[in-house]
Every structure is written in structure tokens, then in C-alpha cells.
Amino acid sequence: MDLIIVLQAGVATGTVLLFATIGEILAERSGVMNLGVEGMMLIGAMSAFSTTIATGNPWLGVLVAMLFAGLISQIHAFITITLQADQVVSGLALTFLSTGISLVLGEGLSKAGTVSLMPVFSIPVLSQIPILGPIFFTRHSILVYFGYILVPLSWYYINRTRPGMHLRAVGEYPAAADALGINVFRMRYLYVFVGGVMAGLAGATISLAVSPGWFSELTTAGQGWIAVGLVIFAQWDPVRAAVGSYAFGALRRLILDIQGPTMLFGFANPFYYNPYWGFFLQMLPYAFTVIVLVIGSREAMRKRIGAPAALGVPYIRGERGL
Amino acid sequence: MAQPNLPNNPDPSPAQPPFVVEMRGIVKRFPGVLANDHVDFELRPGEIHALLGENGAGKSTLMNVLAGLYRQDSGVIKINGVPVTFSSPRDAINAGIGMIHQHFMLVPSQTVTENILLGLDNPRFILNLSRYDSKIAELGKQFGLEVDPRAKIWQLSVGEQQRVEILKMLYRGANVLIMDEPTAVLAPQEIEGLFSILRSMTAQGKSIIFISHKLNEITAIADRVTVLRRGKVTAAGQPARGLTRQQLANLMVGRDVIFNLEKKPVQRGEVVLDIQDVHADNDKGLPALRGVSINVCAGEIVGLAGVAGNGQRELSQVITGLRKCKQGRIYLNGETVSNRSVIFGIQRGMAYIPEDRTHVGTAPNLSVTDNVIMRKYRQSPISQYGLLNMPLAVKYANELKQAYDIIVPHVSTPVRLLSGGNLQRVILAREISGQPQFMVAVQPTRGLDVGAIEGVHRLLLAQREAGAAILLISEELEELLSLSDRIYVIYEGKIMGEVKIEPGEPDPGLIETIGLMMTGTPLEQIEQQGVRVHG
Ligand SMILES: Nc1ncnc2c1ncn2[C@@H]1O[C@H](COP(=O)(O)OP(=O)(O)OP(=O)(O)O)[C@@H](O)[C@H]1O
Ligand SMILES: [Mg+2]
């Protein structure tokens, strides 16, 4: 078990979480929580894979994945923004709906064989850096490199641009934004769409880069939920989200790879001989998600960790007593 | 209608129309309410025009129409003589009309500059905040609105936040500024500051519409007054100079208002509430109360004076059981009530008039009936075998509606639709009908009109005569002086001293002493320095 290789694979796995988490951060910053991430990722993974099979063009697959997931996110947008229904309920429903759609449309895809994947390459100079080079800049999918650019870009967008400032205002105090002529409803639709697009991209990253193929709901295996937890862990900040995503990606790989060798540090590997220990390890990321979600749903805690003040609250114009 | 020109109003030049804003025959209906009934309103350049009226008279509605938030059902608005239609606040701002709402429309986590730039087209994409910081600082200087452009809103005092709101409108080129009860949230010294800002703005040609319930403010600052009653104009643009408080009150409520209610001599009984050396933290976990010891006896009203944010809110919460007490004890009739449940206090005759009427005092979406039975729903006869007897509850609510003059079409109306004065009556009805032994009232008249204030004061005095012990927490010194038998002054969580209030006009020395304590000088020190002392 070579640690460098584990970490290299971890960065690729983490990219999936990164896309989904940043997308959800953008949606939540506008005040809409979308618990449908897992489902939208499945839609993305399925449509990316099947488009690529049909056309042989993985780029087209990624594009279709992003559009399809973005489209399905608009159901959630309509229910929570226009109909002002509960975001948690609608998000859960969206997960069930999109899981169902992707399982039906993806039927038979798992036997489809191999497809052409997104291009993989090393970055010329950077890959020569000791330790970091082989982990971050060697034999990665182009999507992984895109992830590196996305982190500073989204941070800059949120904190240093005019539309980013409007996004923050809409999530913190929509009435104030509305009073100054910012269209709260349009902004929220837009960012829910962006969140969907990013979840679709995350799904495509799985099926066309990180672990190619379609394995029905095991394709995502709950990574959408981990992303929802990571948003809270990251305190709605893209840079922290990157740290969390890559750390979790590496942890996922480590947990898988640690069960391989018979010997570990000169001892018999307990995770190899006793599969239950392995299951226990595999559970940990999800246990983390549950804990973070419980903490994040506490009102007092939310204030302290800087949740957008209007997160989860439908905006109703000019209503008394708000 | 012809109005005499006021001396401090520059004569409008012939090219300029006489009015910056002209509203004619404005009608605005809400389901079941005619909020504005053919209202005419005129604003001249460079004047401060006060808009007065009872709670629910339609002042905010009229101004929301002018600011583009509501669309009038009929009527015309002219700006500088040109008819306009606004379909959004943005249209109104573009026409030079800016409204400052009672609840500040500021994003707490953003800086002053960010809040001011919100919604504007410039900068287009990249926020170069430092460039705008200096622009905003300059604009602030021009009008005497000093505030650090880089500060986050949550770090600012209420007065400073209000300045940001004004700056926001000035930055957008507002020519007319609408201020809906701007002084309701300010401490007395901040009000003086606001007034000098308003004067500097009118001196530079801006016009201001000023809504307030405080009549002395209106006589101090306004050039002209328009009064609304039940959606209709009862006085149109009368010169404010020369109008007395009594005349204004009369125009508002259509009857004489008694400002200083008669108070019977105090019949002080046993100590009911005894607070001993109480310490408590605020929401941020910082000490808010540092060793408060006060007591309240049966049959008296004890005032707690102090500038907002010196621990008053926390003290009321510790007493009612809404906040943990870290050290010290609170006794109600000898029994410990601190760090007990809220119901424990309620069952022992404690009543609470909270500062936040809409969320702590009532459940906004529930009906009047549900709100008035909230203290009683566990007890027979409202509760029978664990079930609510709703017909009885409705009957009870109707009785209270009668007895306390709650103006509402039906007791099944959600209370969020009630005006401030009516909402306060719902709370008072609920709390007083339990015949409390002790009552803590926090800012019970904030935002209420003169008639409603008189009503609340009457109810409090009636409770005092019935032998209840009342702790009155207020920032209105005048209110405290007219109602209280004793006054404690709180500063940074400590009691600075206690004074007795004798019946009759309060003497200026006493007011000065209280003022000094409110700014942090303990009573002993004032005594030592030889200032005249009472109590
Ligand atoms: N959005 C709304 N929906 C329904 N009714 C409303 C609404 N806004 C105001 N009203 C009603 O219209 C009337 C006028 O209300 P408005 O807020 O204009 O009074 P106000 O003069 O500003 O009173 P206050 O001094 O208490 O602020 C009241 O009866 C109120 O209940
Ligand atoms: Mg109002």
C-alpha cells in the first residue's frame, strides 16, 4: 500500500465531493437547501455514461449530465421558491425521484462495457515537484484539474464580485435585497440550477473519470449526502470545502485500500482478516455526515458557524409579521 | 389648499413646481380594511413634513405606496409635477424617493459599503470596495453622517445602522427621504444626533417625511404636519409651529388625551419580587448582569431606567425563567423562581409583557383566541379532560375583546394582522386577566400612538391599585417618571442607584441625577460631588 498512490486516488475521489459541495454551497448561500444532491448526482452519472455510450463523446456526456441534473433541480426550485414549501421535504422527495429516474433509465447500462473516458494527463512541470507533484499533478482526469481552478474561482465570485455580493445578501436578508431591486426569486432559481449543474458534474466525474461505469445506486454510494454534510463542515466557504473534500476523498481511498494487504506495519491486518472491521471503517464517513447534520441543524450552532441567516426560509414578499 | 409659507422654507423658484411630491386621492384596500381612503398629501422642497396618526391609521401604507412597495387602488402620484407610476421600490428610488423602514433593511454580515452598493449597477462585476469606501466616507461627511464604511453592520449601534440606511438612499440620489418611526429604536442622545442630520439634509435641499408617535419630537423638528385617522386626512399640511401636543393628540385620536394620568398615593405592601446579586450572560456568552439586587413590593410600580442594551432585556428574561442565572437568586413571595421553568413562574402569578410583541409576546400566525388562552389552556374550564373547550375559549376571547377594546373583525383573525396597539392590548388582556401578583413590563408602549399609550398606562396603574407588584423596564424617562414610585438605574449590568419619585412634576435635579446614572455614574459618587440628591 503506497501512501502516495492512495492520496493520488484520494484527490480524484475528492473531486466528486468538491463539485457537489461547491454547488450546494452556492445554492445554500442563496437561502435554498437542496437535499437532492445524491439524486442529482445519480442523474448526472447515469446520463453522462449513457450519452457517452451512445455518442462516443465523453465531453458531450458531461454536458448532458450537467444540463439534466440542472433541469431536475428546477423541480425543487419551483416547489420551494414559488410554492414556498418546506425545503427538507422537497429535497428528500427530489432524491427519491431522481434515484428512481436514473435507475429506470440506467437499466442495462451496467453491462454496456467500456466507453471512452475524459482525457487523463500529467501537468508537465508541476508533476516533478516532490510528493505534491505525484499526488496532485500526475495522471489525473482533466476534471480533477478543473476542480483546482474552481475553488479559488468560486471563492472569488462569492466574496469579491457584485453578483456574489448579491448572492450573499439574498441568503442573509432577502427582504433587504428585494427592497433594493434585486430579484430574490430569480436569484434563487439560478443558484439552485447552478447547484444542480454542479451535482450533475460530480456524477459525471464518477462515471467518466474516477470509477468509470454505472453500478446503479452504488455509483454514488451516498457521496451526495457526504457533500451535504461537508457544506456545513466547510461553513459555506469553497476553500474549506476543498480541504474537506480532498480529505474525505483520501479517507475513502484509504478505507478501501487498507483492507487489501494481509500485513499492516508488520502485523496481521485485522481489516483483511475480519471483514466486519472493514464495514465499520466504511461507515465512518456517513457517521460523520449524520453528526455534522445534527450539529448544523441546531439554531444556536448555525448562527455561530455562519449559516446564511435565511437558509431554509421561503421568501414571501411584503408579508406582515416577518 | 393654500398654506402659509414657513420662514425657513426657501421660496420655490418659478421654474420649479411647488411640490416635490403630490399625492391625490390615494385609495389602498387590504382584505377587509380600507387603509387609505382618498388621501391627499403634499411635500414641499426642503421641508420636514410630519405624518401623524393612530396605530393602523394608514401612515405606513401611504408611504409604502409612495415608495413603490404597494400599488394604490386609485389615485395619482406626481413627482415634481409629473405623474408617475411605480411598480417597484427601484422605480421610486430612480425618481428620487427613498424610504427608510422601521426594521432596518441591512444585511448584518456585510460591510457598510457593501450594503450601500447592493442592487446598483456600478461596480459591474469586480467589487473594488476600497474605492467605494472613500466615496461613501465623503458623502457621510457632507451630511454629518459619520460611520466607518468598512465596519460590518452587526458591529454597529442602532443609531449608526440608521445612518447607513440614510446614506444608502443619499448615495442613490434620493431627494425625498421617508422615515417610518425613525426614533422608535433610538436612545435619547441618538435622537438629537438624528435631528441635526435631518436639519443638515434639508439645508442642502432634501425633503423629509417623518412618521412618529412622539408628539414632542414633531413639535421640535417638523415644519408641517399631516394627520391621518382611520385612513382619512384630518389635518393637511398644517404648520407645526404653534401646535400644542394636546392639539396634535386631539387631531390624531379625535378626543382629548390625558398625558399625565392621576396616580393614587402608593399603598406599599410586602416585598413580592426580590432579586439578590444576580449574574447572567447575554446571547453571545458575555456578562450582561453583574450583581443586580432590586426588589418590588405589592402595590407599587418600580421603574428600571437605562440606555438600551445595558442588561434590561436579560434581567427580564432571568426573572421570567427564559434565561439562566449564573449566580444569585430571585424570590417571588419568598419562593425561588430563578433557574426554574417558565410555567413555574406563571403558576405563581407572574405576568410578562415582553419587548418583542410579535414573536415573544404572541404567536403571529395564531388567532386572537389562541393567543389569549395561552396562559390558561392547561386549566379548567378551558381545558376539560385534556381537551380544549373551543366554544368556551372563543367566548372568553370575545369577552376580553370587549373589555380591552381590541379592534379586530373577528377573534379568529391571526394576530399578525393586528396593529401595534391592538397587539399590545391582546398581550395585556392575556397577562392581566390572570390577576397577576407580579408583572414585568418591558417597553410596553414602544411604537404605540398616544391614545394607545394612555390605555396601557391606565391598565398598569389599575393593576398597581389592585395590589400587584410591577417592574416597568423602559427607555422613556418621561414614562418612568409619570408611572413609577421608585426608579432603579441600570448601567452595564449594574445598578447605579435608586431614587424615590414624589407625586407631582418631577424636579430637574432629579432628572439630572438619573441622567448621570444612566451614563455610568453611581449614585454615591453623585452624592459625594454635592449634586442635589433625592430619594
Ligand atoms: N400587508 C397588509 N395586509 C393586510 N392588512 C394590512 C397590511 N398592511 C397594513 N394593513 C392594515 O392596514 C391598516 C393600516 O396599516 P398601517 O401599517 O398603514 O398603519 P400605521 O398608521 O402605519 O400604524 P402604526 O402606527 O401602528 O405603524 C391597518 O388596519 C393594518 O392592519
Ligand atoms: Mg406604521
Image (tube, grey):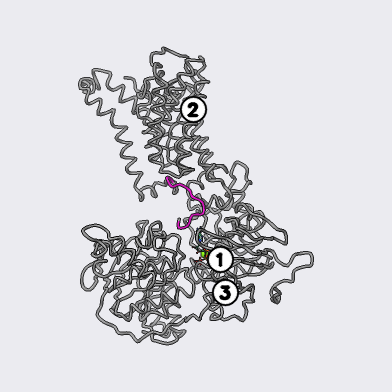
- Measured from the top left, where is residue B32 in percent x and y? 50, 61
Quarter of image, res B354: bottom left
Residue at the image position 36 percent from the left and 49 percent from the top:
A299
Q: Is residue B277 left or right of residue B168?
A: left
User: Disc 3: which chain?
Assistant: B
Real-space CA distance between mark 2 and mark 1, rounded to the nearest whole angstrom: 50 Å
Q: Are marks 2 and 3 in contact (CB under 8 Å)?
A: no
The overriding secondary structure of the stretch rendered in magenta is loop
Q: Is residue B165 left or right of residue B173?
A: left
Please state which of the two labelled residues, at mark 3 or mark 1, is closer to the viewer.
Answer: 1
Residue of label 3:
B218
B188 or A80, nearer to the observer = A80
The magenta segment is A311-321
Instruction: Examine the rendered structure and indicate whether residue B320 appears above or below residue B530.
Output: above
Instruction: Examine the rendered structure and indicate whether residue A269 appears above or below residue B184.
Output: above
Q: Amino acid at mark 2?
A: Phe
Residue A68's label in the rendered image is: 2
A297 or A304, nearer to the observer = A297
> Residue farthest to the right?
B14
Could one spot residue B374 in this view of the protein?
Answer: no
Q: Is residue B81 left or right of residue B75?
A: right
Q: Are marks 2 and 1 in contact (CB under 8 Å)?
A: no
Give the SS element for disc 1: helix
- Measured from the top left, where is residue B200 in percent x and y? 64, 68
Look at the numbered disc 2 and say if its residue's Cβ is closer than 8 Å to ligand 1. no
Could one spot residue A135 in this view of the protein?
Answer: yes
Residue of label 1:
B59
Please state which of the two labelled residues, at mark 2 or mark 3, is closer to the viewer.
Answer: 2
Callout 2 environment at 10 Å: few (<14), some (14 to 19), or many (20+)? some
Q: Amino acid at mark 1?
A: Lys
Look at the numbered disc 1 and say if its residue's Cβ is closer than 8 Å to ligand 1. yes
Upstream in the sequence, badge 3 or badge 1? Answer: 1
